Image (cartoon, helix red, strand yellow):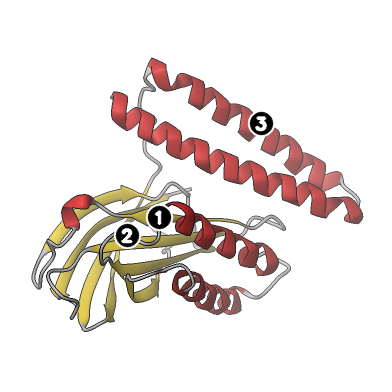
Amino acid sequence: MPTLILEEFHCIVETDEAGWDSPYFIVFVGQRTGNIPTCDVYTIRQDSWDNDIGSGDSRKVNFTIPTEVDTDTLVFVALMEEDDNADITGRDLANVRDWMKAMFQAFGSVNGLPFNQLGSKMYKEFNNAIAANITDDDCVAVQRVIIPDSLGPIRAVNFWGVGGRYWVRFRLVEPAVSVPIPKVCKPIAEEIKGLKKEKEALTKELAAAAPGEKPAINAQIKEKNAQIAKKQQELNACIAKNS
């Protein structure tokens, strides 16, 4: 499946917070795969944006969101305005991720809510999860990114709130060709392979399981997805550091 890139953002009007803006983004990606809905949440920020974004400024980002997407994928993006330090990182990011995973597991299967209703439900929950975990940052707005059925640029998404207005551009691309993995990073890559094999085995087990056995297997699959996502982040960081 294709991958989604947050290419760039442009500040049309900076927010009414004191000083120049310090924007960052929180991205929710939810994938409905049979009765096993999976999702993740990512924070995208750069120190160079802190107190450095004013009206008329643009920045190239080119961040590839690790989760593959298709037309049945829910993607929400929150534009945040940071005060002293970004709130939605570390433990608070984990809290938002856990909140969204619980909601998506509850309502996101193909036998759950219809897709449009699911979108409305998860939009509200994403706003709630962010509001519950910020201290002094502001959420400018949350918008949904509609995934098209063809590759290429996606129509700019507009955000307005807290007195400011931004647009953000995304692009849908084929998965990147694998880059050589440095020797020091290969043990992490092997761990990921092992976790994926374990997940595949659990998925096959789920298909043949009795109804009473499915919840426990689903919980194991959920845990494997979380482990894979964590290890993938470690691998990405390792490759970036050692390439």
Relative placement, left or right, of 206 versus 28 is right
- Mark 2 sits on what residue? 86
Furthest residue toward top: 183
Which residue was labeled with disc 3?
A: 197
Which amino acid does the dot numbered 3 rest on?
Lys
Q: Nearer the viewer, residue 221 or 209?
A: 221
Q: Label 3: how many residues lie within 10 Å, few (<14), some (14-19) or many (20+)?
A: few
User: Which label belongs to residue 89?
Assistant: 1
How busy is the neighbourhood of tag 2: few (under 14 within 10 Å), some, or many (20 plus)?
many
* Residue at the image position 37 percent from the left and 62 percent from the top: 87
Is residue 216 visible to us here?
yes
Contact? badges 1 and 2 (CB < 8 Å): yes
Q: Is label 2 in a helix, a strand or a loop?
A: loop
Looking at marks 3 and 2 on the same chain, the residue that comes earlier in the sequence is marked by 2
Residue 161 at x, y = what percent?
Answer: 28, 82
Identified by mark 2, the residue type is: Ala
- Asked whether disc 3 touches disc 2, contact meaning CB atoms under 8 Å apart, the reply is no
Is residue 197 toward the left or the right of residue 65 in the image? right
Q: Are marks 3 and 1 in contact (CB under 8 Å)?
A: no
Q: Position of residue 163 (x, y in %)?
A: 21, 84
| Residue 79 x/y as whole percent | 32, 69
Q: CA distance from mark 1 to mark 2?
A: 7 Å
User: Would you identify the image quadrant in which residue 212 lies?
Assistant: bottom right
Give the SS element for disc 1.
loop
Q: Judge whether 196 appears above or below 88 on screen.
A: above
Residue at 69% in and 55% down? 36
Circle 1 Cα neighbour tier, 10 Å, few/some/many (<14 / 14–19 / ≥20): some
Q: Nearer the viewer, mark 3 or mark 2?
A: 2
Q: Give the SS element for disc 3.
A: helix
